């Protein structure tokens, strides 16, 4: 695996390879890698000549300084994991490399209602920070395919919107959610949960599975309030939201007939950690 820290160097490598028509798959991450990230790399390896992974804890997408400060950065264990998946290139830029003029020079993208609904409403500016960094990465790396996890469903929709706005000829590949044995969706932030809190957090997937089995037996409202109370039966949990959305447009729906494909999305606080999860119905 080759490690690049400077945009000019990795984009030089990429240009040489696209001239000889090698396809490029790109997996953006914030590091603290787990099987969820590795599954994206493995999928990208199957479909591309060259796979690039980035590790960049993007300051522009954090709306809490404490979260940014305490975000895990275990590079020494990430590197062997990347090598074991036969990732070809790692892009590991500094914040100055990506934002040479600082965070005050961020672009504003018109993300429409996605910007202010659910995660966007609870984390103002978060998605604008996400698309700023992804747009820069796409400009530098010019990948053919971009690999994203279904776990961050709203983020996928936001990045699809970015690709529409910027008309980048890059295909989004959405990869399934990887879970712990308990059903808890893998996440870098799970490191901050104690073993006991992880057991409590596993109620999220149990609830989403219940929702998938029982939807349409109840009205949407009835199932929603039942699901919220199921989560609250586990200690130390507080539902930020549990909503049903049109899986294509991501508009919140209020009746089962409002959308053909439905996704149930949830964010639940477990003490100071806030796992996200979703299930397609
Ligand atoms: P992050 O490092 O959290 O920014 O995530 C980088 C990429 O990995 C994003 O596209 C995530 O959606 C994806 N990802 C994170 N956790 C999982 C998971 N449990 N299963 C599948 N993909 C994931």
Image: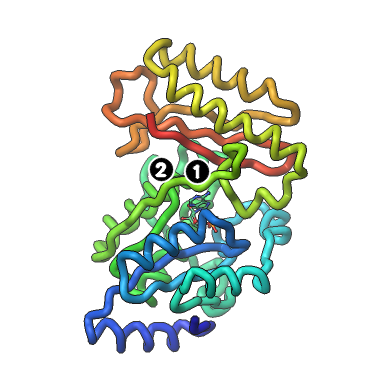
Callout 1: 10 Å neighbours few (<14), some, many (20+)? some
142 relative position to 275: left or right: left
Q: Residue at x 58, y 48 (%)?
A: 186
Q: Position of residue 63 (x, y in %)?
A: 62, 52
Q: Residue at x 44, y 21 (%)?
A: 213
Q: Residue at x 58, y 21 (%)?
A: 228
Q: Secondary structure at mark 2?
A: helix
Q: Position of residue 116 (x, y in %)?
A: 46, 41
Q: Which residue is mark 2?
A: 114
Q: Note whether residue 8 is visible.
A: yes
Q: Residue at x 34, y 32 (%)?
A: 246
Q: Are marks 2 and 1 in contact (CB under 8 Å)?
A: yes
Q: Note whether residue 99 is visible.
A: no
Vertical placement of 264 versus 119: above or below?
above
Q: Which residue is mark 1?
A: 120
Q: Position of residue 264 (x, y in %)?
A: 44, 30
Which is nearer the eye, 169 or 277? 277
265 relative position to 245: left or right: right
Q: Secondary structure at mark 1?
A: helix
Cα distance between the residues tagged 2 and 1: 7 Å
Vertical placement of 175 versus 16: above or below?
above
- Colouring rule applied to residues: rainbow
Callout 2: 10 Å neighbours few (<14), some, many (20+)? many
Q: Position of residue 231 (x, y in %)?
A: 62, 25
Vertical placement of 55 versus 161: above or below?
below
The numbered mark, 2 or 1, whose residue comes first in the sequence reads: 2
């Amino acid at each position: 695996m080759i490690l690049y820290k400077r945009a000019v160097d990795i984009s030089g490598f990429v240009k040489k390879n696209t001239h000889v028509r090698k396809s490029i798959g790109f997996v953006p991450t914030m590091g603290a890698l787990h099987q969820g990230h590795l599954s994206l790399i493995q999928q990208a390896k199957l479909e591309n000549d060259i796979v690039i992974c980035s590790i960049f804890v993007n300051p522009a997408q954090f709306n809490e300084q404490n979260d940014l400060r305490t975000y895990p950065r275990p590079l020494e264990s990430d590197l062997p994991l990347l090598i074991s998946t036969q990732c070809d290139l790692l892009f590991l830029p500094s914040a100055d490399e990506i934002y040479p003029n600082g965070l005050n020079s961020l672009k504003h993208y018109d993300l429409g209602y996605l910007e202010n609904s659910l995660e966007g409403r609870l984390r103002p500016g978060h998605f604008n920070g996400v698309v700023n960094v992804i747009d820069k990465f796409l400009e530098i790396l010019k990948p053919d395919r971009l690999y994203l996890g279904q776990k961050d469903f709203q983020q996928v929709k936001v990045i699809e919107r970015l690709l529409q706005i910027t008309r980048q000829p890059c295909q989004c590949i959405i990869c399934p959610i990887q879970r712990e044995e308990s059903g808890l969706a893998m996440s870098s932030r799970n490191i901050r949960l104690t073993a006991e809190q992880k057991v409590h957090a596993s109620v999220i997937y149990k609830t989403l599975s219940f929702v998938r089995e029982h939807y349409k037996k109840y009205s949407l409202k009835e199932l929603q309030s039942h699901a919220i109370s199921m989560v609250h039966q586990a200690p130390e949990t507080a539902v930020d939201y549990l909503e049903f959305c049109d899986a294509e447009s991501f508009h919140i729906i209020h009746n089962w007939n409002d959308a053909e494909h439905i996704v149930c999305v949830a964010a639940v606080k477990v003490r100071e950690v806030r796992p996200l999860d979703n299930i397609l119905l």
